[in-house]
Amino acid sequence: MAREEKKEVFRSTVAIKLASIRDLVRIASTAAASMQPTYILRYKDKEGKTVIGFLAVFRDYYNLYGLPLFYYVIDHDNELKDANYVLVRLDESGEKIEPSKTTKPGYIAVPIVNVDKAPEFLLPSKVD
């Protein structure tokens, strides 16, 4: 009797477009500060726009193990063009967010990873 092979089916993530890069960095740094492995993905979409985003999981989503989320923004102004990290620091003067080539002591450093293109499972449809 031949064994039936099951083809793995990936569900798409839920894409959530944020209002600004600051919002994206704030939520990514919060995940990083809670010791969750966090990195920001950067790639060009089919129209040549730079997409910046990160993956997260909304845990215990009904009876599923979790709902995969992709928080993203389009970097129209190339704010993070040459950055390898986004550094975040909170102190009495407020929130400081800065793109950087390296890390700095006293900051939460979220790495930016360049990918050639978005993985198929990442986006349910075109981001705009």
Image: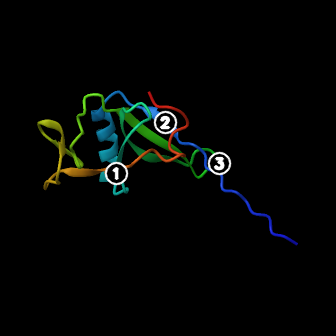
Q: Earlier in the sequence, mark 2 or mark 3?
A: 2
| Disc 1 element | loop
Task: Write down the residue under mark 3.
Answer: 63
Type of amino acid at the residue the image marks with label 3: Asn
Q: Quadrant of residue 94?
A: top left
Image coordinates for residue 89, horizontal then vertical, percent: 18, 45
Task: Write down the residue under mark 1.
Answer: 39
Q: Residue at x 57, y 43 (%)?
A: 12
Q: Residue at x 23, y 34 (%)?
A: 79
Mark pair 2, 1: CA separation: 16 Å
Task: Write down the residue under mark 2.
Answer: 15
| Disc 3 element | loop
Mark 1: few, some, or many residues within 10 Å (few <14, many ≥20)? many
Mark 2: few, some, or many residues within 10 Å (few <14, many ≥20)? some
Residue 81: assigned label = none
* The one of 58 and 92 positioned closer to us in this rendering: 58
Mark pair 2, 3: CA separation: 20 Å
Q: Residue at x 34, y 41 (%)?
A: 27
